[in-house]
Image (cartoon, rainbow, N blue to C red):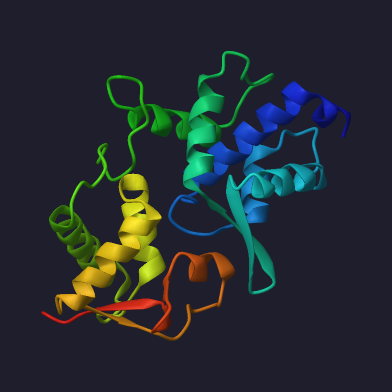
Amino acid sequence: MKSLNNHLEVTQAQTRILLALWDLGGEKQEVKRTEVVDRAKRSSEKSGDYKSILQELEKAEVLKIAKKNKAETVFLTSKGLQMLHEGLKNPEFKYESNIGAKTANALLKWIREMDDTGKFAPANGVKSGVQSYEEFEKIALDVYEKLNNDYSYNHLVPIYRIRREIGERVSRSDFKEWLLEMQANDILQLQGGSVEDSAPDKIEDSITTELDGLRCYAKLLKV
């Protein structure tokens, strides 16, 4: 489509996609690509106009695209969250016509999750990084219990869900090191297998070690 060949229009379309994905919960779970595009595109545009934009965003590691039950799903990465933050702050970003209630409510939701300095605060409300194993252990156990209760995992919680819930408070290397330390301390047992749909992004967000291989689930030993 002609409008999306313009650099500014493409940039604004990217921001609309990221906002739609974030509002649909894409920071924590996969969302159907069709839902995201339908929310982001303007009335004069077609879904196919966004194919190349999604591919570019995936190439830039702003989002991850996978297939689930033959349908494409999209997941928002931490890099994508930062790009959304910068896109909404850009004075050139604007809507050319009236927006629907869903878009307006998404913007209001974003504003409410900003702290008083104008810096985006994660949905969990924690703004500072985890500095020690002891702090990580407490947070990981809280997240474990929350996920176990909310999704009835019967104390076999997917590691990728724990990683995504904790988010950018912990680096990938520290997450792996400290989760393995929790296993060494007989707090958690990390188990093998694979994720429910063998999605590459979920496997990537699990843990792999040289000795034990892929570990996809955590089980609390001290119930």
Picture residue at 53% right of the left edge, 33% below the top: 84
Q: Quadrant of residue 39?
A: top right
Q: Position of residue 188 (x, y in %)?
A: 21, 77
- In front of the other: 77 or 69: 77
Picture residue at 56% right of the left edge, 26% below the top: 87
Picture residue at 25% right of the left edge, 63% below the top: 178
- In front of the other: 154 or 217: 217
Residue farthest along the right direction in this orientation: 2
Quadrant containing the N terminus in the rendered view:
top right
Q: Position of residue 3 (x, y in %)?
A: 83, 27
Picture residue at 43% right of the left edge, 79% below the top: 210
Q: Is residue 96 above or below residue 14?
A: above
The reply, left or right, for residue 218 in relation to residue 4 is left
The reply, left or right, for residue 15 in relation to residue 134 is right
Q: Position of residue 169 (x, y in %)?
A: 31, 46
Quadrant containing the C terminus in the rendered view:
bottom left
Residue farthest along the top direction in this orientation: 91
The reply, left or right, for residue 134 in relation to residue 49 is left
Q: Quadrant of residue 212?
A: bottom left
Examine the rendering and report whether any part of residue 59 can be seen: yes
Q: Position of residue 6 (x, y in %)?
A: 81, 24
- In front of the other: 100 or 90: 90
Examine the rendering and report whether any part of residue 223 can be seen: no
Q: Quadrant of residue 66?
A: bottom right
Q: Is residue 212 above or below residue 82?
A: below
The reply, left or right, for residue 85 in relation to residue 185 is right
How many numbered marks does the figure carry? 0
